[in-house]
């Protein structure tokens, strides 16, 4: 079977969303945004699915954020806003997904890759993983809602420090601040993950959806949407700066 750039599969009562561009470290391009929109909507309505798990193809990367070679064609604030707000909607759909969601960080997660993980309820990582909200090093901020979600996931001061340092850090630090809930050895992560998720899947879909709804009841969506829109607008403004375009050009020109 030829797998798409986002492969959706239902296996063992789990809706799997597999980011599948391993030669680009599973960076997100326009085709993948379309496939994520369709795939998440399909899994949401599928009664055989009890939980959603998002992961990356291959062993090296979960996701390296936006595909810099695809997105460097976006120059103006308006062009950036259009892409960022579409991915913001994808991440809000993940954040509000009516069943438990897990980001299985099988490899590096940076930039928008970290934002995708933050939209999920739980983050599980392989012990070799490094992750980071590195957007600042490109002259932009998070622009898919990542800051808004991160402030809900970890203490606000820890979130602020991660964002302003904009560097890659090991999973041990992620565990300490509560960003990552569980770490497994790289060699056994698939098997360990199955053992970890099995007790959850013993519950009926009704039970899992009811608890997820109680979790979502704690969230003030009017505020979340307002904060996301401010975040996306600010990132769009910075996107159009010379500093951002030069940083992307420098990455693309590396030997
Ligand atoms: C646009 C949305 C925005 C947001 O709103 O959040 C962002 O996501 S901003 C952040 C964008 N992402 C990045 O800046 C990450 C760029 N990549 C890296 O820093 C590094 O590649 C890595 C992810 C830390 C991995 O480093 P390393 O192990 O040394 O591998 P390589 O650097 O050699 O990469 C392998 C291969 O993959 C290509 N690649 C990696 N990331 C991207 C990317 N984001 N877009 C496009 N291509 C990417 C890289 O070019 C290499 O390709 P080849 O040279 O052809 O082998």
Image: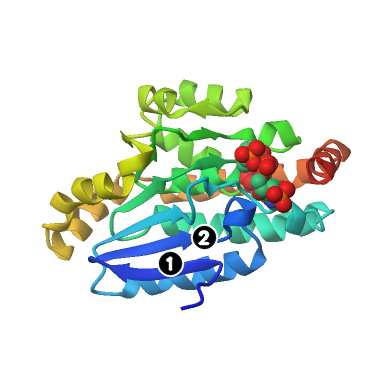
For the point 17% across and 53% down, the residue is 198
For the point 23% across and 51% down, the residue is 194
> Where on the image, by quarter, is ligand 1?
top right
| Element at label 2 | helix
Q: Is mark 1 within 8 Å of ligand 1?
A: no
User: x and y percent of residue 77 in the render?
Assistant: 80, 52
For the point 33% across and 59% down, the residue is 52
User: Going by the image, does 88 lie left or right of 176?
Assistant: right
User: Going by the image, does 246 lie left or right of 70?
Assistant: right
> Quick check: marks 1 and 2 in contact, CB under 8 Å?
yes
Furthest residue toward front: 187
Furthest residue toward bottom: 1
| Element at label 1 | helix
Q: Residues within 10 Å of mark 1 (few under 14, many from 20)?
A: many
- Lower sequence index among marks 1 and 2: 1
214 and 114: which is toward the camera? 114
Name the residue carrying label 2: 90
User: x and y percent of residue 134 in the render?
Assistant: 63, 34
Question: Residue 40 shows which numbered tag?
Answer: 1
Colour convention of the picture: rainbow
Question: Residue 246 shows which numbered tag?
Answer: none
Image height of 131 relative to 105, above or below:
above
């Amino acid at each position: 079977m030829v797998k798409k750039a986002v492969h959706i599969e239902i296996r063992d009562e789990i809706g799997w969303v597999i980011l599948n561009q391993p030669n680009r470290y599973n960076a997100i391009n326009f085709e993948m945004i379309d496939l994520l929109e369709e795939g998440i909507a399909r899994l949401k309505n599928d009664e055989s699915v009890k939980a959603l798990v998002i992961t990356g193809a291959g062993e090296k990367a979960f996701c390296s954020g936006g595909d810099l070679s695809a997105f460097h064609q976006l120059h103006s604030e308006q062009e950036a806003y259009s892409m960022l707000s579409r991915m913001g909607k994808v991440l809000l759909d993940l954040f509000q997904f009516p069943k438990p969601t897990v980001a299985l960080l099988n490899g590096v997660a940076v930039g928008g890759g970290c934002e995708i993980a933050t939209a999920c309820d739980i983050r599980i990582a392989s012990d070799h993983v490094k992750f980071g909200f590195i957007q600042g090093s490109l002259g932009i901020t998070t622009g898919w809602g990542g800051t808004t979600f991160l402030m809900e996931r970890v203490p606000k001061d820890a979130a602020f420090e991660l964002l302003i340092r904009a560097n890659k850090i090991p999973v041990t630090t992620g565990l300490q601040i509560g960003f990552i809930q569980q770490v497994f050895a790289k060699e056994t992560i698939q098997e360990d993950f199955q053992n970890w998720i099995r007790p959850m899947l013993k519950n009926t879909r009704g039970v899992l959806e009811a608890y997820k709804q109680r979790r979502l009841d704690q969230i003030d969506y009017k505020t979340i949407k307002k904060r996301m829109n401010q975040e996306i607008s600010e990132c769009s403004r910075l996107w159009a700066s010379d500093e951002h375009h030069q940083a992307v050009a420098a990455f693309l020109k590396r030997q």
